[in-house]
């Protein structure tokens, strides 16, 4: 009986120790989660992240404007100059010689239209960056002259 009591005491002590270790690990894990959450909130609230989010939203709206510009103004004029051709309708059909089924349609006109849209977006972004650089140079030159 004496040995059984000793075993029970050792088991009880081990269980208490295990519970204490588990409690410490849980406390440490909650601090890690809190630190991650705090760091994430600091990251999200930085000005650069907010600026990026605004840029993405404005970029989405700008894409709609550029698509309209290309589809409704540029491409109809380009089609008229090419003899009334709608660029999006230009395609090549490659016959299926292997199985004799339907051929594959290569819509190169659609690709060309997307290239034109990309070039317009790239040009507008270039002009914005160029203007910002010019304004930054003027600001930097103005500051140096005032310091002297």
Image: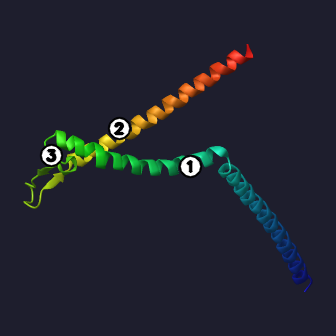
Tell me the SS state at disc 2.
helix
Residue marked by disc 3 = 84
Question: In 3D space, how far apart are the residues under numbered discs 2 and 3 (Cα atoms)?
Answer: 23 Å
The residue lying toward the viewer, choosing from 64 and 112, is 64
Label at residue 94:
none
Precedes in sequence: disc 1 or disc 2: 1
Q: Is residue 141 above or below residue 89?
A: above
Q: CA distance from mark 1 to mark 2?
A: 23 Å
Decide: marks 1, 2 in contact (CB < 8 A)?
Answer: no
User: Which of the pair 32/142 is nearer the observer?
Assistant: 142
Foreground disc of the pair 3, 1: 3
Coordinates of residue 74 in the picture (x, y in percent): 28, 42
Classify mark 3: residues with Cα within 10 Å, few (<14), some (14-19) or many (20+): few
Q: Position of residue 10 (x, y in %)?
A: 87, 74
Residue at image position (73%, 13%) is 148
| Disc 1: CA contacts within 10 A as few (<14), some (14-19) or many (>=20) | few
Q: Which residue is mark 1?
A: 54
Categorize mark 2 by other alpha carbons within 10 Å: few (<14), some (14-19), many (20+).
Answer: few
State the colouring used for the structure image.
rainbow
Q: Regarding mark 3 in the picture, which secondary structure is present there?
A: loop
Which residue in the rendered view is the most extreme toward the bottom? 1
Drawn side of residue 24 relative to residue 115, left or right: right
Which comes sooner in the sequence, label 2 or label 3?
3
Q: Give the residue drawn at x 40%, y 35%.
A: 123
Q: Which residue is mark 2?
A: 119
- Please name the residue shown 34% across and 46% down the image: 69
Locate residue 33 relative to residue 116 in the image: left or right: right
Which is more N-terminal, label 1 or label 3? 1
């Amino acid at each position: 009986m004496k040995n059984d009591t000793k075993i029970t005491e050792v088991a009880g002590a081990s269980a208490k120790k295990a519970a204490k270790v588990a409690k410490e690990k849980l406390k440490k894990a909650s601090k890690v989660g809190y630190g991650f959450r705090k760091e994430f909130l600091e990251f999200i609230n930085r000005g650069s992240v907010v600026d990026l989010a605004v840029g993405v939203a404005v970029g989405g709206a700008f894409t709609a404007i550029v698509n309209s510009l290309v589809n409704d103004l540029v491409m109809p004029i380009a089609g008229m100059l090419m003899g009334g051709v709608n660029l999006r309708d230009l395609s090549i059909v490659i016959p299926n010689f292997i199985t004799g089924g339907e051929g594959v349609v290569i819509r190169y006109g659609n690709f060309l239209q997307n290239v034109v849209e990309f070039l317009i977006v790239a040009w507008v972004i270039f002009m914005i960056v160029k203007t910002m650089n010019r304004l930054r140079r003027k600001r930097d030159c103005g500051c140096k002259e005032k310091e002297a």
